[in-house]
């Protein structure tokens, strides 16, 4: 994956993760670095657009609450976060992770924060799928006999 | 995006924008009066007051025209990060930033239509200093006010278009003065 794709990946993981998990895992890495706000967390709305079947004309699915922020660590690295909902602490933690992931701490953060969050998301997805699977009805056709 | 472009917004956006809005409102209501506006710290060559006007009034709904002398990578990035305003051609812009010579010919800018006279441009013009060369009269001026304007003939022509016309905000460092389309500049 290119650097931009990697960043897209981890920003998505951080945004979709459970806020308390992000905070716990980030604090597990060590004390949080000092930073200054470039943009304090602010709540806004974004229009979610869809496209039926991937070919139809885009339509507006609905508005979604989003919190964004930007900060700069004392060492100069800049982190951004866009997270669903209005949890400002989540946005702050995600932006710190984004900044840390860009430097020499990157691999460590990947292993100690992003990987566990991905595993957590996978587990949640599998549990959901298993719940759905339990109510699945299989239709099948009996072999039709000749006589 | 360079780090400089990410800095220089209002420290507290709500309070900073409210204070700057009040200054712009006062300046436009009382043409000829000069107001200090602080809090913004845009990259040079954009001035402090012009930057505060941008942070306060520009957003993704207001196309902005930047004079070539201002449109450095840093200033463009600063606008993109802090205001989200799209850049536009002169005729389509709701806000224009530059010096008076940059904006020439000033007739390129939108003056609104009879149905929607508000769909006009606001010119934010950086001047080297505020002088008192010309007499101003009109709404918001009790007796008379004095101000140096870059080109009185252009302002007189614009005033004659009322209710159409563009509005101007003169900026000089961290101070600004308003010259709405209603103000009569006497040569």
Image (spheres, grey):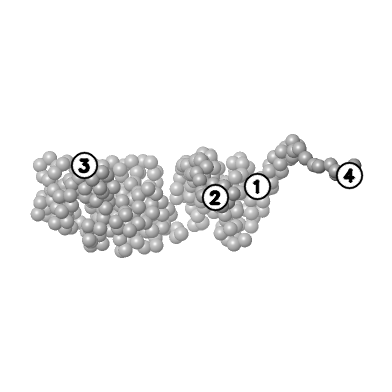
Nearer to us: label 3 or label 1: 3
Q: Where is residue B128 in the image (x, y as percent from the top left)?
A: 22, 59
User: From this viewpoint, is residue B8 visible?
Assistant: no
Measured Cα–Cα span from mark 1 to mark 4: 56 Å
- Residue A147 in the image: state x and y as whole percent: 90, 42
Residue B135 appearing in the image: yes
| Percent x, y of residue A111 | 66, 53
Q: Tell me the quarter of the image containing the C terminus of chain B.
A: bottom left
Q: Do labels 3 and 4 share a chain?
A: no
10 Å crowding of disc 2: few (<14), some (14-19), many (20+): few
Quick check: B29 left or right of A55? Answer: left
Marks 2 and 3 share the same chain: no
Q: Residue at x 12, y 45 (%)?
A: B137
Identify residue for label 3. B29
Residue at the spot of label 1: A117
Residue that badge 2 annotates: A56
Q: In which quarter of the image is residue B99?
A: bottom left
Q: Residue at x 19, y 43 (%)?
A: B30
Q: Which of marks 2 and 1 is in front?
A: 2
Same-subunit check for callouts 1 and 4: yes
Which subunit holds the residue at mark 3? B
């Amino acid at each position: 994956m290119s650097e931009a794709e990697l960043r897209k990946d981890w920003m998505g993981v951080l945004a979709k993760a459970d806020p308390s998990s992000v905070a716990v895992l980030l604090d597990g890495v060590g004390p949080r670095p000092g930073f200054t706000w470039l943009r304090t967390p602010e709540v806004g709305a974004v229009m979610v657009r869809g496209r039926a079947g991937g070919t139809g004309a885009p339509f507006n699915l609905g508005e979604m609450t989003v919190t964004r922020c930007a900060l700069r660590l004392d060492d100069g690295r800049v982190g951004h976060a866009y997270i669903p909902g209005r949890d400002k602490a989540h946005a702050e933690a995600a932006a710190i992770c984004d900044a840390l992931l860009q430097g020499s701490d990157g691999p460590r953060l990947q292993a100690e924060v992003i990987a566990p969050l991905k595993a957590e998301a996978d587990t949640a997805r599998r549990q959901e799928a298993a719940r759905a699977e339990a109510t699945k009805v299989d239709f099948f056709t009996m072999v039709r006999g000749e006589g | 995006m360079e780090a400089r472009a990410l800095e220089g917004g209002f420290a507290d956006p709500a309070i900073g924008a409210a204070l700057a809005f009040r200054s712009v409102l006062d300046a436009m209501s009382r043409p000829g009066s000069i107001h200090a506006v602080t809090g913004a710290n845009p990259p040079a060559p954009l001035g402090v007051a012009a930057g505060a006007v941008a942070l306060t009034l520009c957003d993704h709904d207001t196309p902005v025209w930047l004079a070539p002398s201002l449109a450095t990578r840093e200033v463009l990035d600063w606008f993109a990060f802090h205001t989200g305003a799209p850049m536009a051609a002169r005729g389509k812009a709701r806000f224009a930033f530059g010096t008076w010579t940059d904006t020439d010919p000033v007739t390129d800018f939108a003056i609104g239509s009879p149905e929607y006279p508000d769909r006009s441009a606001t010119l934010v013009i950086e001047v080297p200093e505020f002088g008192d060369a010309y007499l101003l009269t009109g709404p918001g001026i009790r007796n008379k006010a004095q101000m140096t304007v870059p080109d009185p003939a252009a302002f007189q022509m614009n005033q004659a278009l009322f209710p159409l016309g563009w509005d101007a905000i003169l900026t000089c460092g961290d101070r600004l003065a308003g010259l709405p389309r209603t103000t009569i500049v006497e040569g």
